[in-house]
Image: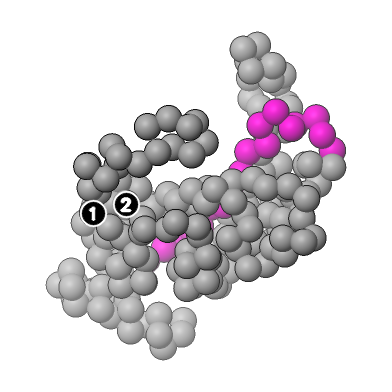
Amino acid sequence: MTTELTKQYAAVAEALNLKNVHEVPVITKVTVTTGVGKNRDNKSYLESVKRDLALVTGQVPQVRRARLAIAGFNVRQDNIVGYRATLRGKRATDFTKRFVSVTLPRVRDFRGISLNSLDGQGNLSVGIVEQLAFPEILPEKTDIVFGIEVTFSTSAKTKQDAEVLFRALGFPLTQADEKREEATVDIRQGKK
């Protein structure tokens, strides 16, 4: 563990008033997922998604297949529906540092991560609309744009403990402002 990370975890232990070092909440794994949607039969699209996700995570992503056939979505059992990469240990630590310091500042119109993204078990889920926010992806070398979901799983027992952990690690968490959320326009749907 780096000294910078040790200082951050020491700050978390002090803020939560924890005496035992093993009680301090830590990030246990990072899961990076993406869906392929209606492009599941387009081989070149699937290869591009797999290549870009491998560049972002540093490992080959796992293929996610449909468990059930759903006629309304024209999905057959065992169709490819997405890709997933699970990072642990040093890869998870390195990815988290790059995500906070490089990727989030590159996201268009970024105003922080809402506290509503934290679940009751202390896990944080963040969606990135374009994979081009990651510095590993060169816009001139990619021909598609897709979204990525990143989930940071922690050993925190409560939402408040996780909030202290993520703030110490440099995540720009913001309070959920009800008025601002109502006024924003959903770009994908074109609705208010």
Vertical comparison of 72 with 33: above or below:
above
Residue type (three-letter) at the residue carrying disc 2 = Ser
Vertical comparison of 69 with 147: above or below:
above
As drawn, the residue found furthest toward the right would be 44
Does the CB distance between marks 2 and 1 fall below 8 Å? yes
As drawn, the residue found furthest toward the bottom would be 3
Q: Is residue 184 left or right of residue 47?
A: left
Q: Is residue 29 magenta?
A: yes
**Mark 2 highlights which residue?**
114
Q: Secondary structure at mark 2?
A: strand
| Inter-mark Cα distance, 2 to 1 | 6 Å
Name the residue at 40% across, 38% down.
185
x then y, percent, for residue 15: 18, 73
Q: Nearer the viewer, residue 92 or 72?
A: 72
Q: Which mark is residue 142?
A: none
Q: Is residue 85 magenta?
A: no
Stretch in magenta: 26-43
Q: Nearer the viewer, residue 150 or 89?
A: 150
Name the residue at 42% across, 58% down.
110
Name the residue at 34% across, 64% down.
172
Vertical comparison of 187 with 79: above or below:
below
The disc, 2 or 1, on the residue closer to the chain's N-terminal end is 2
Question: Counting other residues with Cα less than 10 Å from the Cα at mark 2, is it few (<14), some (14-19), or many (20 or more)?
Answer: some
**Mark 1 highlights which residue?**
175
Q: Secondary structure at mark 1?
A: loop
